[in-house]
Amino acid sequence: MAPILLRAFMTVSLTTAVICFLVFNGGFDGAFTETGLKHYAERASPILKAVLPKWLKMPLNTVVNFGYVIIGAYWLAVIFHHHGQKNIGEIDAYTFYVFNFMACFYGPIQTIRIIMDKHRFAILDQWVTLPFFMWVFVWGRYLTNGWSNLRVHTAITFSVSSYVLTLYYDIGFEIALGLHIILGVGGAVLAYRKYYTPDAQTPFICAILCCTGFVVLKLLDLHLAKIHPFFTKVSGHFLSKIADFLQIHYVSKFFMALTFKKIECETKKSN
């Protein structure tokens, strides 16, 4: 049980370390990112400004990132329990562990980006988002076609490499992210079709809605602030982050239902 947990942790750690090295080595300084308060609608109230440290310019956009860690830790605990009870196999546990370790890593990375508001931290925040979505595709393909180290390594290498688009286009990240979302949804749909179960239907719909909310609310951040001052306190960007970590929860719940259905089908075949 512990070795597979450690393997998943090292997988995420090494991928993140490679990205960090490339970012802070300056190789992607030419990538376009949005830094500065002008790109965010949230403005701390005068009361909060008086009591909070000066570096905490967007309190809600900072605090909300703990949601990623909470959701990730919750699912790590759930899978640790099921794996310990031998309800799921090694590779099944590994796929869950990797995905939710990504969540635990992403929370602090996003927090540092908001607090530091520097170009390289913004690059790091963007870049680590891509393997996150690619893992959903990998997960779906594993359920439909079994585990393949070659497929996994190819997919993750493609995912990490796709960030090079940001060096050529201002919307390079958006292009790469859009492709990753399409691949992720496609992989999930293929898995859903193979191991259909009613238990996966609601989490699938909720995950799609949360993904849509994540994208739309983030894009509308500054526009919502023009509609009503409320959205300068509770901003679209803040709400998009809630949708984002809820998306992680529902994706995990979706794959949990499919995993148990797969195990049920395999048990029937063996009997």
Image (cartoon, helix red, strand yellow):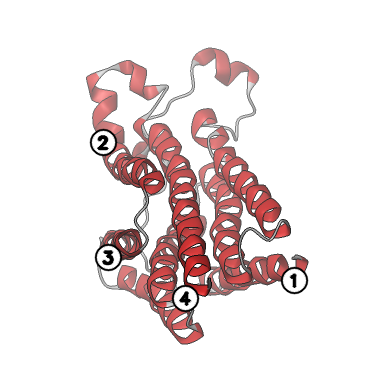
Residue 159 appears at what percent x and percent y?
Answer: 40, 72
Instruction: Kindly give the residue lying farthest to the top in the view shown.
Output: 47
Residues at discs 4 and 3 in contact (Cβ within 8 Å): no
Residue pointed to by mark 3: 179
- Mark 1 residue crowding within 10 angstroms, few (<14) / some (14–19) / many (20+): few
**Residue at position x 44%, y 39% in the image:** 241
* Secondary structure category for the residue under label 1: helix
Residue 230, image x, y percentages: 35, 17
Quadrant housing residue 181: bottom left
**Looking at the picture, how far across and down is residue 121, in whole percent?**
52, 56
Q: What amino acid is found at the position of numbered circle 2 in the picture?
A: Leu
* Of the image marks 4 and 2, the number of the one nearer the N terminus: 4
Labels 4 and 2 touching (C-beta < 8 A): no
Closer to the chain start, of discs 4 and 3, is 4
Query: With respect to residue 95, does 75 lie above or below?
Result: above
Mark 2 or mark 1, which is nearer the start of the sequence? 1
What amino acid type should be assigned to the residue bearing mark 4? Gly
Q: Which is closer to the viewer, label 4 or label 3?
A: 3
- Residue 134 at x, y percent in the picture: 40, 66
Q: Can residue 119 be seen in this view?
A: no
